[in-house]
Amino acid sequence: MTTLVKPVKEKVKSEEDIVIKSRPIFAISIIAVGIILILIGMVTSISTGAAGISFSVVLDAVFHFNPSLEQHQIVYNLRFPRALTGALIGAGFAVSGAIMQGMTRNPLADTGLLGINAGAGFVLVVVFAFYPNMEFKYLILFSFIGAGLGVGLIYAIAYFAKGGLTPLRLVLAGAIIGSLVKGITQIISLVSGVSYELAFWSAGGISAVEWFQVKVIIPWITIGLLGAIAISPKLTILSLGEEVAIGLGQGTKVIKALAAVVVLLLVGASVSTVGGVGFIGLIVPHIVRFLVGVDYRLIIPCSAVVGAVIVVIADIGAKLINMPYETPLGSIMAVLGVPFFLYLARKEKRELI
């Protein structure tokens, strides 16, 4: 059986190389600065929009909420959950991308490219069609199922293809199956009359997020992030290569299974809330690896922070680009992500083939 033989820019041969090529002090600085930027970005996001709100009003609404004041209602019930959701799903998508790239040793791994978003969208549109009034706390469970079906189908096709599982075949299978599933999803949406819900999901955005959704996804994303941190040492060893990991006594199948569960938790919660926002999981891990090195004990927390910063800032742009109208968050990330993807594809062309 042919396995993935090229790591994601991780030219290392041992655990000692990983330590040498890592920058823990730099990682701590990124996390500290990133947290500050998240807070500043969230306050800025809450302040900006069709109705301008001053910083003092934002603080007053957060700490001394008065339901009789319209600006307090806007801050607390509309903009605060939106900003918080942006940080949560940014961390979720970024960490899931880092795990997938490390687990598959595929530099192009991303939830959108590997069919997870498409699988979740297919199951969600079926739910919209037949159970339109389903509560969000149950809807998120179907998102997990759809994400699992999507990635399972693509891995199966790539695995049984002639020549085995390679990075290039994985991406091609994801593109083909993703397009097929999206086509079927659109047919179901048109026949069942749920095209509006699908349009919102496909565009990707957090403008309509409410507190009840935030309360549902926080436990799932928190568990996923903690799980990612817990498996990060094992993922670092796995990134050396499966044969090396087995030689070091690691149960690679168990590690991959745990990593898959973590990814599905993070992506399922994020996709069910904001829709098909792609490229976050592609861009952020590459930036973080360039800055902190190849140790996933550093990559995972830094990816969470950097992903949160990017999405919060991108959502501010979604408000301001075409005021008073909203620009879909998914469109902004696509504008940033497509050139980055083409750059990576060109750079890795020889190794992928």
Image: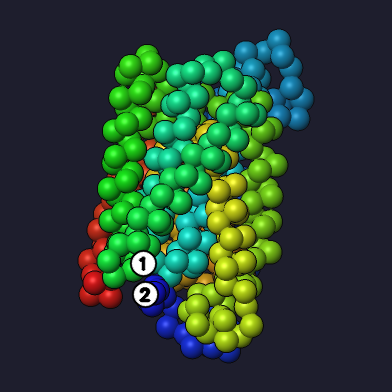
Residue 275 x %, y %: 45, 34
279 vs 251: above or below? above
334 vs 60: above or below? below
Drawn side of residue 230 relative to residue 237, left or right:
right
Residue 5 x %, y %: 38, 77
Residue 115 image label: none
The residue drawn where x is 54% and y is 40% is 145
Structural crowding at the residue carrying mark 2, measured as other residues with C-alpha within 10 Å and reported as few (<14), some (14–19) or many (≥20): few
Name which residue type carries label 1: Leu
Structural crowding at the residue carrying mark 1, measured as other residues with C-alpha within 10 Å and reported as few (<14), some (14–19) or many (≥20): many
Drawn side of residue 135 relative to residue 205, left or right:
right
Mark 2 falls on what kind of element? loop
Name which residue type carries label 2: Thr
Residue 266 x %, y %: 57, 47
102 vs 48: above or below? below
Colouring of the image: rainbow
Q: Tell me the quarter of the image containing the C terminus.
A: bottom left
Mark 1 falls on what kind of element? loop
The residue drawn where x is 43% and y is 21% is 197
List the residue tagged with mark 2. 2
Between 304 and 105, the residue placed more toward the observer is 105
Residue 283 visible in the shown view: no
Residue 122 visible in the shown view: yes
Between 306 and 211, the residue placed more toward the observer is 211
The residue drawn where x is 39% and y is 25% is 198
List the residue tagged with mark 1. 165
Query: Where, by quadrant of the figure, is residue 121 drawn?
Result: top left
For the residues bearing labels 2 and 1, Cβ distance under 8 angstroms: yes
Q: CA distance from mark 2 to mark 1?
A: 6 Å
Between 58 and 120, the residue placed more toward the observer is 120
